[in-house]
Every structure is written in structure tokens, then in C-alpha cells.
Amino acid sequence: MSPISVTMLGTASAVPFSDRNPSAQALSVRGRLYLLDCGEGTQQRIRQEHLSFVKIQAVFISHIHGDHIFGLYGLLSTMSLYHRTEPLVIVGPENLRPVLDFYKSAFGADDSYALDFRAIAPKQPEQVYEDGDIRVSAFPLNHGMPCYGYRIEEVVGLRQRPWKPRSYAYCSDTAPFPELAQWVAGVDYLYHEATYPQQYADKARQYLHSTTLDAATCALNAGVGRLLIGHYSSRVKDISVFETECRTIFEATTASNDGDIFEITR
């Protein structure tokens, strides 16, 4: 089987670190790329990781807080400079539409390629995208505004032996809620934000984010293969505390860093 990998392009939260960009990830499936969020600095990190702009098929945006979309304008402009002709699918909440319209009107975006924007507003898991390689479902998160997570599964053809499609779930900004574990149940890798260590649980509740123990509990209840965490608060300088706390509940936890690559294998 060809590899499926996830490259961390940004693991910081609202404020960039000197060595961390805000939220962005690149999923690579059979030579195609798919972006999950697009925070500031995403295209620079794409270059550093030697990924190809022209292989990006779709961008999935969780919500329109700046740390998840401020890299989008630069990325779209670079694609124009590279004379992209293939339409780019952008999936996200309806309030992303005026952000894209402003880009086209204010910056004189050319018509070399089309932006195929697909607005979503699911109340429960709902398929929002499919091509020959992946199938994507979106589901609501708990962040006080339209905000969505994504579950990605590979598309496989007929096989002589049973094969469970490899899978990945991306849960960006969210406070914990019981349905989430059901919606990401059984995925090979779960990315779940862990903005705060447990000592800042009051901050997590105030801003509708998750703590380390919230993320680990979700992973445990969902029966996932591995938990990846990120979206770290700038209050905390020693990232190792995030992983240590998660492992008290879910041992198979990795605190992700910018530039990390995770291969989903069987």
C-alpha cells in the first residue's frame, strides 16, 4: 500500500512561537496533498518540508479565527503565480465565503484557476468531500462559533482480503463534549487540540478549548490507535508537560512539533 502521512505545518495556538506556526497540517495520500487549516506561515513551512503547491487538491478550514486562516491569502496568491489551472476545493463554514470574496475583489485575483468553495454546516457527521483517494466527513465542534472537525478515510477498491481503510481525524479548537468520541471512534490517528495543561482548566473552559486530560479522555473513549496533540498555549514553554499529562490517561500520545511527519501504516 502507498503511504499516507500527516506533516505538521503549525502546532502553536493563537500566538506564533519562534519555532512554531499557528495551525496547519498537510495530509499526503498517493501523491496528492490536502491541507487542514492554513494559519500564518503555512506556505513557508510547505517549502521547508519540500511539499508541492501544485499537488494540493483541497483545503479544509475548521473555522475563521485568524490563527487558522491567515495563511490562506498568501497560499492562494502563490498558486496564481505558479499558473495553477486546476480548481482548488476549499471546504469550510459559510462565514468563510466573504473572506474568499474579499481576496478576489481586493487583490485582483486572476481567473487562472477557480476557487470551488463548499460551505458546510453539519449538525452531526456528514460527508463533505470525496475523490478517488479520500472520503471526508465533517462534524461540529464546541467552540462558540461555527467550527468543524474532519474525519478522513482512504478510498479503497475491491480487494481479495478484507481491508479496513486507514483513517485520520482532525479536531481543532473545541471544548470537550460527549459525542466527539463517537464521531472519531476507531480512527488510526486522532489529532485533538490540547491548548492547556490541566492546571489551566479554568482558562480552557473560559475560551472553549481542551486540556491535556480532555484530549486524552476523548482518545481513550474513542478507541483510537494514536493521539497527536498540538495547539499549545504560549503560556507554557516546556511542551513535554502536555505529553506527560496525556499519557496518564492514554499512553499512545505524541506531542507534535512543526515539521513532524506521521505515517499511517497497517
Image (cartoon, rainbow, N blue to C red):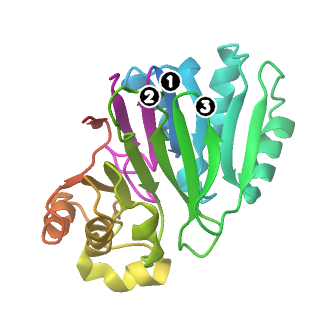
Mark 3–mark 1 Cα distance, whole angstroms, equals 11 Å
Q: Is residue 222 above or below residue 84?
A: below
Q: Look at discs 3 and 1 and give the one toward the viewer.
A: 3
Q: Are marks 2 and 3 in contact (CB under 8 Å)?
A: no
Disc 3: CA contacts within 10 A as few (<14), some (14-19) or many (>=20): few
Q: Is residue 194 magenta?
A: no
Q: Are marks 3 and 1 in contact (CB under 8 Å)?
A: yes
Residue at the spot of label 2: 29
Disc 2: CA contacts within 10 A as few (<14), some (14-19) or many (>=20): some
Mark 3: which secondary structure?
A: loop
Residue at the spot of label 1: 32
Side (left or right) of 225 relative to 210? left
Q: Are marks 1 and 2 in contact (CB under 8 Å)?
A: yes
Q: Is residue 65 visible?
A: yes
Residue situated furthest top in the rendering: 83
Tell me which label, 2 or 3, sits earlier in the chain. 2
Residue at the spot of label 3: 131
Mark 1: which secondary structure?
A: strand
Q: Is residue 106 above or below residue 204?
A: above
Q: Nearest the camera: 97 or 247?
A: 247
